Image: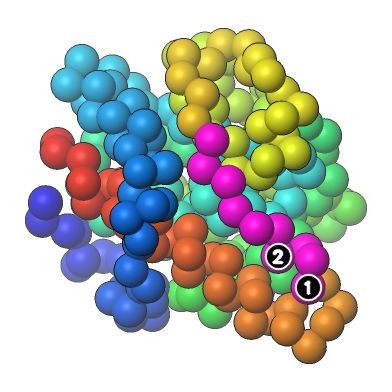
């Protein structure tokens, strides 16, 4: 599929051009998500993806941002991405810094404990609104969405997601394990690029 590159921020394009390779094992994990998106496309339906993790602080935000970016990059229409948790905390500040390092432009919109951020990947495109919330928050879809479980704790703790028409476990190691260590920045970057590579694979595989 032809990628759209003209309006993505240049630093973001550089990040995407050097993403790691997705293993065959992970491609099998991602195939149900590819199938879900493909089916929605063929039925000309809206594609709503809610990425869910326990605290909606790290992995779910990275997944939401990269999925929306790759849908735009590969010109897959009618995709809206969301994120949520089994509880609300805050969008992690190192995640924000990591996304900026990846080439996104981020503006903080509030000074509350649970900051609200506007995340942009291209000019003249509405920003992704990032803040921590429960998966069933009014900000998120209530029906006909895919629930993408990004951590095993949330996947095991929420056997039923009301309103979801598909549930897909795509879990990642928590970079929180490295908070406060010398490896923190490296591991957050590693997780972001891993998620970016997998969302890149998903949307490059879908046929519009």
User: Which sits in the foreground, 166 or 4?
Assistant: 166
Q: Position of residue 100 (x, y in %)?
A: 56, 74
Provide the residue span drawn in magenta.
169-178
Name the residue: 43% across, 61% down: 196
Q: Which residue extends farthest bottom?
A: 182
Question: Quarter of the image holding residue 69?
Answer: bottom left
Q: Position of residue 61 (x, y in %)?
A: 61, 50
Question: Quarter of the image holding residue 191?
Answer: bottom right
- Label 1, label 2: how far apart the Cα atoms are: 6 Å
- 10 Å crowding of disc 1: few (<14), some (14-19), many (20+): some
Please check the rendered image and state whether residue 173 is part of the magenta-colored stretch, yes or no.
yes
| Residue 63 vertical position relative to residue 121 in the rendered view, above or below | above
Report whether 178 appears left or right of 108: right
Could one spot residue 84 in this view of the protein? no
- 10 Å crowding of disc 2: few (<14), some (14-19), many (20+): many
Name the residue: 25% across, 22% down: 39
Q: Position of residue 95 (x, y in %)?
A: 66, 65
Q: How is the image coloured?
A: rainbow
Q: Are marks 1 and 2 in contact (CB under 8 Å)?
A: yes
User: Which sits in the foreground, 199 or 172?
Assistant: 172
Q: Which residue extends farthest front?
A: 25
Residue 175's label in the rendered image is 2
| Residue 121 vertical position relative to residue 110 in the rendered view, above or below | below
**Element on which disc 1 rests:** helix
Question: Quarter of the image holding residue 197?
Answer: bottom left
Residue 178's label in the rendered image is 1
Residue 79's label in the rendered image is none
């Amino acid at each position: 599929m032809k990628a759209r590159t003209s309006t993505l921020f240049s630093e973001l394009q550089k990040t995407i051009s050097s993403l790691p390779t997705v293993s065959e094992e992970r491609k099998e994990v991602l195939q149900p998500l590819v199938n879900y998106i493909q089916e929605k496309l063929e039925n000309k339906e809206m594609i709503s993806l809610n990425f869910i993790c326990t605290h909606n602080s790290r992995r779910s935000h990275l997944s939401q941002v990269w999925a929306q970016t790759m849908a735009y990059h590969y010109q897959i229409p009618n995709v809206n991405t969301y994120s949520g948790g089994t509880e609300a905390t805050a969008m992690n500040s190192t995640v924000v810094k990591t996304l900026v390092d990846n080439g996104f432009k981020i503006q903080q919109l509030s000074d509350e404990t649970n900051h609200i951020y506007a995340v942009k990947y291209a000019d003249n495109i509405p920003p992704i609104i990032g803040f921590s919330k429960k998966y069933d928050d009014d900000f998120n879809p209530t029906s006909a969405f895919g629930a993408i479980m990004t951590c095993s704790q949330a996947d095991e703790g929420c056997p039923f997601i009301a309103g979801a028409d598909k549930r897909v476990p795509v879990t990642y190691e928590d970079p929180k394990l490295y908070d406060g260590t010398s490896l923190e920045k490296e591991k957050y970057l590693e997780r972001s690029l891993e998620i970016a590579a997998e969302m890149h694979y998903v949307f490059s595989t879908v046929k519009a």
